[in-house]
Image (cartoon, coloured by chain):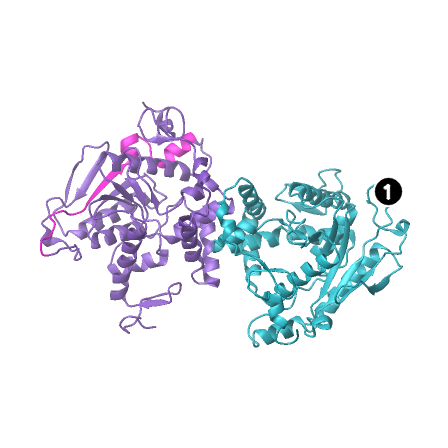
Chain colours: A cyan, B purple
Amino acid sequence: MKCRKCSEVAVINMRQHKLALCADHFIEWVPAQVEKSIRKYRMFTPQDRILVAVSGGKDSLALWDILLSLGYRADGLYLGLGIDGGFGYSDESQRKCEAFVKSVESGNQAIRESGSQGIRESGNREASSSDSPISRFPDSLTPDPWLPKLHTLSIPATYGESIPEVAGRVQRGRGKPCSVCGLIKRHEMNRIAHELGYSVLATGHNLDDEAAVLFGNTMTWQVGYLARQGPVLPEGDGFARKVKPLCRLYEREMAAYCLVRGIDYIYEECPYSFGATSIAHKELLAELERKSPGARQNFYLSFLRAKENGFLNDHNQELSPLMHACERCGQPTTAPGLCAFCRLWVNVKI
Amino acid sequence: MKCRKCSEVAVINMRQHKLALCADHFIEWVPAQVEKSIRKYRMFTPQDRILVAVSGGKDSLALWDILLSLGYRADGLYLGLGIDGGFGYSDESQRKCEAFVKSVESGNQAIRESGSQGIRESGNREASSSDSPISRFPDSLTPDPWLPKLHTLSIPATYGESIPEVAGRVQRGRGKPCSVCGLIKRHEMNRIAHELGYSVLATGHNLDDEAAVLFGNTMTWQVGYLARQGPVLPEGDGFARKVKPLCRLYEREMAAYCLVRGIDYIYEECPYSFGATSIAHKELLAELERKSPGARQNFYLSFLRAKENGFLNDHNQELSPLMHACERCGQPTTAPGLCAFCRLWVNVKI
């Protein structure tokens, strides 16, 4: 199969777009698609300071790479969850993130305290821009001295317990730690973006992720969730806007992007993800996609279009319960008193 | 496994209800469920004259049987489509319907013209109620002399072409006849219910059918269809209300009901149904159901609940185009001039 644009050998065929591209045109095409999403959904502008939540996986590292290549001021945030899984999952993930940020600037790494609880940063503050391997900064004749840095935070070092430990304690050893993990990650990402003054928090959710979440909410007609689901969650009460710039790209495209760009990511999934409902939903959507290429994309994007056109009644928004500020951390919560995150730790420390 | 109600051996286990029942309690339970749906969705009352569209398959014959057993005045309508498929599909289907109505009253069959175009009826008008095998008519001490009859209409005999012939002509030999078949069936059912003065037209769509249609409309967010989908389509302009009393029962329950009640139905699917999108959607939902019993039921019923609670914006209804009366047949149509049904025949005859 040949590249649609230059007739070189194609490295990927995207059936939902009826588009095959060679390596060079593919790594041009992907950032252009992301830029389209950023503009279409008004995610952010070059003036925003963006914090990318990186896990060491393909999506989040690709997202960071793409945002940098598009000239956005995007730093990374890695949360160390203390998950081992027999192969040092968290440690290995962190190494991938650190290797990525090092690869952006070939040396000159500094690690210092950033002044926010538990946060360290590895980065390139002192680097001169001429060393940057990122070739597509805007206005390359007058390069911006800014270079990206990686913030890291260890949950065990900061809170005294790993994710599996705290989940095991509050769930009394039953079930998987995924919901506790999600809760902690959301809280810490919000807190750190807020404390470090980022206006935007970007996550690497791709179209497969978003379609699977939409599918889950649709299969049970969770009207409140449907009303909120979208590529942008507005900022509020000093907390950063949350955006998903990869929401129109398939997972396999992100894997291909990392391969072509030489981004080394962790291949292993989180050891706790096995058997998750979202994975079952992804498989069903993949089955639908095999039978009808583009079905998954159409499912997600036609939902967003229908929402834009107002198919949901406004009062669905009101199904979201009222938010208050947590008495301890100040983050928005639906619970009176302490938020769910603070309640996790209240028995251990305050 | 034992019956929940009497500890006899169960013939069916309905995992979505966590309910196993013996044969006797199962054939009590099914009509009770149907009666609940009839009341919940205000489908009809004992005063209504109901026309059941019967295909000879398990769902429609079971529906007719259930409505009779609940004491409703339900007649049948069989449309002969002229589909052979190498095994005389239409002829065999018709025989099943005729055998069913004969079994309701052991003899005394009369066939006569009913005065509406092309319609014949086989039935039990002269039968005395004491012969009726239907044991659950209300007020059995003063039995109603009414007995059900079957109207039949042959599309080839009435319009000069079978469904495959007319579809082949208008589609120039390409594609399957399913959309033309659906169009003709809907039109003829509307016409006959109207001409014979039935206030309600009932079809045997079960929960699997309805969930598959909902799934298809949801996968592409067909907002207009979502706004209209439900177990009741209101009457209008002299045309009967359309209802789906089996909308809360699974397909396998209808098969079990026929088996236990001794209703002989046609096992073969329509030869053109192979590969239909709706069947692919049914398989995906069946997969979801296997992983999570009740998922299919929850998908459909939570949609109906969300609609009742007004999650869809009212203006979605307006996405349905305006209806006019067809200049030839008077049925509602969105097209100016002739409706799609009349346009099918306009080249052949007028």
Residue marked by disc 1: A140
Above or below, B174 against A114 in this view is: above
Is B146 included in the stretch rendered in magenta? yes
Q: How many marks?
A: 1
Q: Is residue B95 magenta?
A: no
| Left or right: B169, with B60 as reference point | right
Mark 1 falls on what kind of element?
Answer: loop
Residue A186 image offset from top left, x and y in percent: 64, 61
Provide the chain ID for the residue under circle 1. Answer: A
Residue at position x 50%, y 45% from top?
A: A314
Q: Image height check: is B246 above or below B224?
A: below
Relative height, residue A118 to residue B323 (above, below): below
Residue A286 seen by the camera? no
Left or right, B14 with respect to B114, comes to right
Observer-nearest residue: B292 or A154? A154
Query: Residue at coordinates 28% horizontally, 68% vertically from top-left?
Result: B22
Amino acid at pointer 1: Ser
**Residue at 69% of width from left, 61% of height from top?**
A191
Q: Position of residue B293 (x, y in %)?
A: 44, 63
Residue range (magenta): B141-170
Snapshot quadrant of residue B163: top left
